[in-house]
Amino acid sequence: MSNKVLITGGAGFIGSNYVTYVLENTTDEIFVLDKLTYAGDLKNLEPATGHTNYHFIEGDICDMALVFKLFEEHRFERVVHFAAESHVDNSITNPGAFIATNITGTFNLLQAAYKTWMEGPNLYKKGCETNRFLHVSTDEVYGSLGAAGLFTEQTPYAPNSPYSASKASSDFIVRSYYHTYGMAVVTTNCSNNYGPNQHKEKLIPTIIRKAVAGEPIPIYGDGKNVRDWLYVKDHCVGIKKAIDTGRLGETYNIGGRNERENLYIAHTICNILDTLQPKGFSYKEQITFVGDRPGHDFRYAIDASKIEKELGWSANENFESGIEKTIAWYLENSDRLF
């Protein structure tokens, strides 16, 4: 069965990969809504251009009138909500944008879906009974882990940056629409993504860019901060499973079971570049330690057991296989690094 699907933030990193995945694997009609800020790039959507089931709308989820107009005009049956301000450093210098987009924008989408799909609490309009709203969130809402332990869906929220606090707030608003109105929502909280189309300011593209440019490769603090890395296509497959077969009102953590220290990430990328684009010395000599980020969480790691057991999802890529594909993509698309 085909659905009319609104994908917010579909010109961004994860959203654009999801658009490509869905167009390749379903007959759904896809409507991408994106503000095209610094993080959104129409180049990310070039694989979708010309596809008969693809439509692009430039607009802001903070524009409530626009959001309601689009729901009324297109009668979306599914919403996959990626649109968010997501860079922690930017949230430290400009938190207001994160509050507006991540909280108010999410509310606008939920309210438009509620008014379009439902007569009132727990009463869907005829023909809307199978409509679904999936909210894409982050493991950063759980705060920071010590050397041991994993984030589960029962981990108490403890956000430590304006970014993660705004995402935590949006998660709670989504939850409230299930418990108050009976709206069919599902939330996914993911670990750090990497892969094609990631914005150049993020950690992995930055390491690649600085390395090939012959510049210092900046690593915060002592490089011992740990992240669980998830290849973006694996994430997209998990999101599709969650919106199709996830239990309503539930949260599913999606992680790659690939914990790596930031310094290991840098060394691995340098080693691969030493092979692919060798020069007279190792790229590792460019690694430079810089002052740590304020409030820098020490470790994130996700327990993905719930989505693995309930929905049959598992990551296909480990970090070492995924990073090779990622570096190869950036070397072939070097214009996306600079």
Image (cartoon, rainbow, N blue to C red):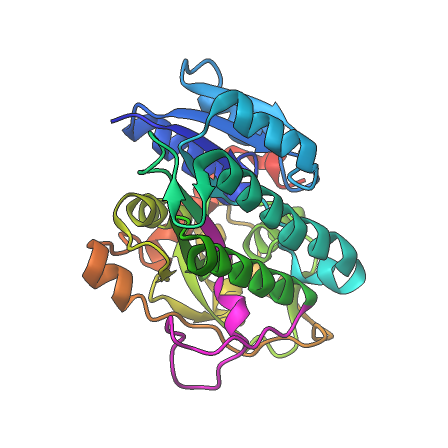
In this rendering, is residue 15 above or below 281?
above
- For image coordinates 66% across by 77% down, the residue present is 221
Quadrant occupied by the C terminus? top right
Q: Which residues are magenta?
A: 135-161
| Residue closest to the eye, 14 or 210 | 14
Q: What secondary structure characterizes most of the magenta part?
A: loop
| Residue closest to the eye, 103 or 26 | 103
Residue 292: image location, x then y, percent = 70, 75
Q: Is residue 157 magenta?
A: yes
Q: Residue furthest bottom?
A: 147
Quadrant occupied by the N terminus? top left
State left or right for residue 96 relative to residue 276.
right
In this rendering, is residue 250 above or below 11?
below
- For image coordinates 38% across by 75% down, the residue present is 154
| Residue closest to the eye, 94 or 126 | 126
Q: Is residue 287 in sight in this rendering?
A: no
Q: Is residue 159 in sight in this rendering?
A: yes
Instruction: Give the quadrant of residue 64.
Output: top right
Residue 188: image location, x then y, percent = 41, 56
State left or right for residue 259 relative to residue 164.
left
- For image coordinates 54% across by 69% down, the residue present is 141
In this rendering, is residue 246 above or below 145?
above
State left or right for residue 62 relative to residue 170.
right
In this rendering, is residue 12 above or below 191?
above
Residue 61: image location, x then y, percent = 64, 39
